[in-house]
Image (cartoon, rainbow, N blue to C red):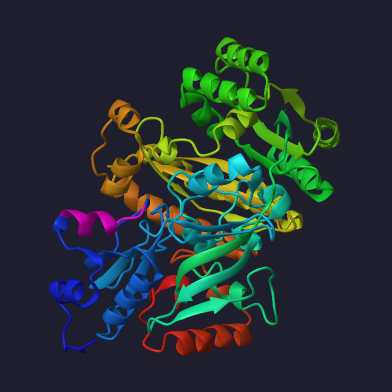
Amino acid sequence: MATKVNLSATDFIAETGVETLTDETNLNFYAHDVYERGADLMAVVRPKDKEQLSAAITAATSQNISVIPRGGGMSYTGGYTSDRSGAVLFDLAEMNRILDINETDMTVTVEAGCTWAQLYEALQPKGLRTPFWGTLSGLKASIGGGMSQNCLFWGSGRYGTAAQSCIALEVVLADGTIMKTGAEHTRPYGPDLTGIFLADTGALGMKATITMRLIPEVEAHGYASFTFETYEETLTAMAEIERSGVATECFGFDPRLNAIRMQRDSLTSDAKALGKMMKKQGSVWGALKEGAKVVTAGRSFMDEAKFSLHVLTEARIQAAADDDLERARKLALANGATETENTIPKIIRANPFGPLNSMLGPEGQRWAPVHGLLPHSKAINCYKALKNLEVKYADEMEEHGIFTGTLVSAVSGSGAIIEPCLYWPDASNPVHEDTIEDAHFAKLPRLEPNAKAWELTQKIKKEIVNLLHEHGAAHLQIGRTYRYRDSLDPAADKFLQDLKKSLDPKGLMNPGSLGL
């Protein structure tokens, strides 16, 4: 391949043969993530396989042009939005094939652009799934993005985060080298080379293929919901349930987020989703009963003034799932819980990858989560500090129409996620318009740009990030938001920088991500 002094967008197309977008509309769209807009892009390329990915990276970096990977576009932490203009963004959505389902060795290999929903649907007829099997945004969120961000939700209560289900990777380095890590059937084999590229938010290389473990899909489920008067009771109960190992998911909402959840999703779609799930489990009568229960209960079953906790259990036989649920129930009730209608966990499980309409608030407000992963011993004090921070800004937040709602979730062996979500009145961006269902989007008020609310939101978000750092929180989806390198031992930080220089000597692979 001939080297040129300057590589224009037209040259890039000629050099690689990869689909390349250079029009203003697409460049503007891809410069956004869910939270904000990054610097202007030179071009967007859409490779169809790892060979095209490698060739396109080589063509760009040989001309000292930065390259940035984008998965499903669901990042809100600057995972693919750079402050350095002129980069080439790699949209990996076209690399979405399921390459191999090995039922003998119980592994599956996919291309990085395959979504969690796509993989789940392909494995269902075979009675299989991955241990961690996706995020709530899995309709669009990609598996490559999940491994780069180290996401969580489905299966996290028992199996941990996405990275813990990964066995091996094929990664394209900054010079275009395709490197395979680990063995096809086990991890680690020697030092954990696969682990180096997991949760790196694309700072060390672009994932081309991912190999994960498979497990049999379960046949029996249990569901329970509880309300608590305080966050202390909620977090204590969640910690005890996580330590007991009985739940596959255990998550909850503060009163504000309870209220928001009650305002969205139609009763009709809830009833249909539950009916579909019950029919899959072979119970037509159960489907009718569950659908009728949702319509009858309406949205009144959850006390919006309280904290909620939702528990899902699963097992090979119903007796085992029920026993796990009973153990979780005793732990919740011992910590001050009142059991309530279990519709929410049933609805979510019935439609695990639903429409992503909650990317905007119930009145069209912008939304931005900020999270910390804390050991259970530190979770309550951190939550208290977050509440105090909210009190500090209460008057200003009310003045500008800003409010918060907080999610908590258990992560097996790692502790508790605390995720305050900021809502503020502001104009939507192209990612919202592309992602939210048209019918839902049409019902939302169209808000005008609100510079003052945005400025205060930015300030509060930064203070939350700093507070979480002070409380020793770890983070998923590090991107360009969290203080990862400030958390490292100096020797570990030097090792990370040396590794980056070895793999990416010119600093062209997603510069700024991970703070590198």
Find the residue positioned furthest to the front. Answer: 104
Magenta highlight on residue 278:
no
Q: Picture coordinates of residue 36 (x, y %)?
A: 33, 55
Residue drawn at (64%, 74%), measured in percent from left and top?
183
Overall secondary structure of the magenta section: helix
Hey, which quadrant is residue 235 in on the image? top right
Looking at the image, which is closer to me, 256 or 476?
Answer: 476
Range of residues picked out in magenta:
25-33
**Position above or below: 351 against 470:** above
Q: Picture coordinates of residue 475 (x, y %)?
A: 57, 62
Hey, which quadrant is residue 234 in on the image? top right
Q: Picture coordinates of residue 458 (x, y %)?
A: 39, 55
Hey, which quadrant is residue 56 in on the image? bottom left
Residue drawn at (51%, 53%), measured in percent from left and top?
370
Magenta highlight on residue 30:
yes
**Position above or below: 84 against 367:** below
Q: Say whether residue 197 is left or right of residue 58.
A: right
The quarter of the picture where the N terminus appears is: bottom left
